[in-house]
Amino acid sequence: MTNAVEVRHLSKSIEGSPILNDICMNVRQGEVYGFLGANGAGKTSLMKTLYHIIFPDTGTVCLLGETINKGNNPVFSRIGSIIESPVFYSHLSAYENMELHCRYMGAGYENIMETLSLLGIAETGKKAVGKFSLGMKQRLALARAMLTKPDLLILDEPINGLDPQGIIEVRELLLRINHEYHTSILISSHILDELSKIADTIGIIDHGAMLAEVSMKKLTANGIDLESYYLGLLGGGGKNVESYPHGN
């Protein structure tokens, strides 16, 4: 089976300082992959290289079976994403921003209201996005990412700015999309508990290096929680996990 995301020996330095160091990553088709690391660990930098917002110095990236090169990459039309803080036309409504995204993607408008409803922002009417709360803007970003029913979602900290109820709703929505449409999801966070509730596989990054990729089922089968595993890898006093396999 083709991996949804396949990264091989990817490295990047800026002004002589490495930000990504020989990263390898596999996100299998149809799974939810939780990308875990502290703020500044390299999560966003890695996601930017997937889109070639940042060009890697070495290494390769394949998305949905297609190698990503400089220039036009048609496979991006099959991918929805949130990378860093979402940007909108602040004077336009949620619906109008979604219309513009449809034009950019070459898609029809038929899914706009359904998608806005899924994210709980269909009743915002003509209200300008500039007057939205941070949580509402994050919901709109998720709606835009999901609008074209993509094969792959790449989500950088998508629950930032959401209240506890909003976090639960987004978690349930992502699981529903994954189960019903077999959408592959790469989701980054620094919140261990939330990733443990949604992810099939966890990739752990620290100081630009991938420390491990581990199946949540394997952790559970070995009676170890994600927090202890994470702290053990970082040498922070967690349970000794040396005997546990780091692969999928």
Image: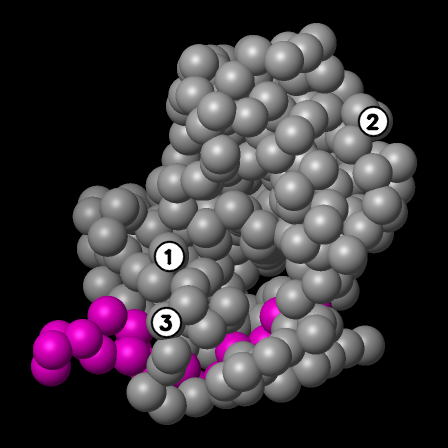
Q: Can you tell which quarter of the image residue 223 is in?
A: top right
Q: Which residue is mark 3?
A: 54
Q: Can you tell which quarter of the image residue 101 is in?
A: top right
| Residue at screen point 43% across, 21% down | 130
Residue 86 higher or lower than 216, as above or below: above
Q: Which residue is mark 1?
A: 43
| Residue at screen point 68% across, 59% down | 79
Determine if the magenta segment contains residue 8: yes
The segment highlighted magenta reads 4-22
Kindly give the residue lying farthest to the bottom in the view shown.
Answer: 58
- Nearest the viewer among 92 and 124 is 92
Q: Given the image, on which type of amino acid does mark 1 rest? A: Lys
Q: Secondary structure at mark 3?
A: loop
Q: Given the image, on which type of amino acid does mark 2 rest? A: Glu
Estimate how packed mark 2 is, as few (under 14), some (14 to 19) or many (20 or more) residues with alpha carbons within 10 Å.
few
Residue 128 higher or lower than 52, as above or below: above
- Nearest the viewer among 223 and 113 is 113
